[in-house]
Image: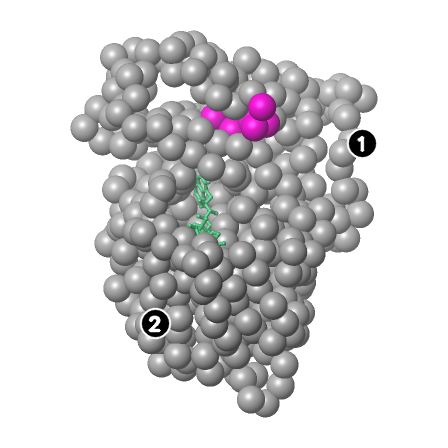
């Protein structure tokens, strides 16, 4: 089986690791180095990193707690991770590690793919043309090949972040293993701002918002926080999809290109690797004896896809109502809860409500102000019940 992998991100490289003994693998990546340009913060749950075979090998730092607040001067809500810490993966270290575990028959660096035709034909700049039995689109959040070939339409916002030093932040966030999430219109009208210590007094500060305003927001925030950037990077964050097609014929999508992410935070490393795990399993089981891509689509359309769509609907509800959510957050100022699993946002929310049951009732007052016009209620209801 000849498999052409478009894009050398973590999803396709993990797939290559898993398929190393099952297929002849060909990597096509538009950049001249894997993992560059950088775009990602790299936060994932430690347990999932271990489960996916990463262990501590590519971990830069770990975090035992996180505060969500609307100002650095308020206490906000403190989440303590009791059983499952957050870790910051090194990127491009992650890509290099996965690449080292894979085995390729052919590698085409510096080739941008422009077209994926039926029958597994892949064309790119410079007259590149090859054909494969299976083609896997792992182009990240770009949504060009996945839209043209499969009809997927991703919902994305833009993120910009910087690594740098700040005396002000050093005074405010004096625990190297604590993350601060700033939530509210003052920071972002569409998402949130994060302050993540990297160790040795350095911070990674970022914000996500609509592409037209994110640059302005970012400059304002780093100036307010007194951050001198050593490097600035970013990209598109996937919050879901308005229509999806995980694969058909001989073409499948993995990672961000499927629209499956943890849309409340925009995290897509783990979910992307999970899509690859499923694709590797079905290719292993059904190659030559069935239709692996159809099986893959069915598998993703099940629990993982439904959960992703539910979280995407929740995420659009939260982020279309930043002012309302900010008011609700104020009610919880000073609350501290233990959260056993960073990945389970619903559990964290329930624990928060359980910590102050009366506040749960108070929150009802915010219901009439909710703007639900942008929410896909059908996705939310069918996925959750
Ligand atoms: C600001 C920001 C912060 C983030 N923070 C986190 C976080 O803390 N935790 C987390 O889990 N996720 C985070 N993410 C999301 C995370 O980066 C992605 O979910 C993840 O990288 C997706 O992996 P992937 O393999 O699907 O695609 P990518 O990592 O995007 O890789 C795609 C690859 O395909 C290549 N490519 C694209 N088009 C073509 C083409 N036409 N031809 C050839 N090559 C092509 C690209 O060069 C790239 O190498 C963040 C994203 C952003 C933008």
Image point (39%, 74%), residue name:
25
- Is residue 209 covered in magenta? yes
Image point (44%, 29%), residue name:
160
Is residue 232 shown above or below 153? above
Looking at this view, name the residue that lies furthest to the front: 127
Residue 257, quarter of the rendered image: bottom right
In percent of width and height, residue 299 lies at 62, 68
In percent of width and height, residue 29 lies at 40, 57
- 350 relative to 50 in the view: left or right: right
208, 123: nearer the viewer: 123
In percent of width and height, residue 214 lies at 52, 23
Residue at numbered disc 2:
106
Image point (58%, 56%), residue name:
145
- 94 relative to 359 in the view: left or right: left
Q: Magenta region: which residues?
A: 207-212
The colour scheme used here is one colour
Q: Secondary structure at mark 2?
A: strand
Image point (63%, 37%), residue name:
315
In percent of width and height, residue 230 lies at 26, 25
- 342 relative to 101 in the view: left or right: right
Question: Is residue 334 among what the camera can see?
Answer: no
Using the image, tell me which numbered label, if any, was put on residue 373: 1
- Is residue 360 covered in magenta? no
Of the two numbered discs 2 and 1 in the rendering, the one whose residue sits closer to the viewer: 2
């Amino acid at each position: 089986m000849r498999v052409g992998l478009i894009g050398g991100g973590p999803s396709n490289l993990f797939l290559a690791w898993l398929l190393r003994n099952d297929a002849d693998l060909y990597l096509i990546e538009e950049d001249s180095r894997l993992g560059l340009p950088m775009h990602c913060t790299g936060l994932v749950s430690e347990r999932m990193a271990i489960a996916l075979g990463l262990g501590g090998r590519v971990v830069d730092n770990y975090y035992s707690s996180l505060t969500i607040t609307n100002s650095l001067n308020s206490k906000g809500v403190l989440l303590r991770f009791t059983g499952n810490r957050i870790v910051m993966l090194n990127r491009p270290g992650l890509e290099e590690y996965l690449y080292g575990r894979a085995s390729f028959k052919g590698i085409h660096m510096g080739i941008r793919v422009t077209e994926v035709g039926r029958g597994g034909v892949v064309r790119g700049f410079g007259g590149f043309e090859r054909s494969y039995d299976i083609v896997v689109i792992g182009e990240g959040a770009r949504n060009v090949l996945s839209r043209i070939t499969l009809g997927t339409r991703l919902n994305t916002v833009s993120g910009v972040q910087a690594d740098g030093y700040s005396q002000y932040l050093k005074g405010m966030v004096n625990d190297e293993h604590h993350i601060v999430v700033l939530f509210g219109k003052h920071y972002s009208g569409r998402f949130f701002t994060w302050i993540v210590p990297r160790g040795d007094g350095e911070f990674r500060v970022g914000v996500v918002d609509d592409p037209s305003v994110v640059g302005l927001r970012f400059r304002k925030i780093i100036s307010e926080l007194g951050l001198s950037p050593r490097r600035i990077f970013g990209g598109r964050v996937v919050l879901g999809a308005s229509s999806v097609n995980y694969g058909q014929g001989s073409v499948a999508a993995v990672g961000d290109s499927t629209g499956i992410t943890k849309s409340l935070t925009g995290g897509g490393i783990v979910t992307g690797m999970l899509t690859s795990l499923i694709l590797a399993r079905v290719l292993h089981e059904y190659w030559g004896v069935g239709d692996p891509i159809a099986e893959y689509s069915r598998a993703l359309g099940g629990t993982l896809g439904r959960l992703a769509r539910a979280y995407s609907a929740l995420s659009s509800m939260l982020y279309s109502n930043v002012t309302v959510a900010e008011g609700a957050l104020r009610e919880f100022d000073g609350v501290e809860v233990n959260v056993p699993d960073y990945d389970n946002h619903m559990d964290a929310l329930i624990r928060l409500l359980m910590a102050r049951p009366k506040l749960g009732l108070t929150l009802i007052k915010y219901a009439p102000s909710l703007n639900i016009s942008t929410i896909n209620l059908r996705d939310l209801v069918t996925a959750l019940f």
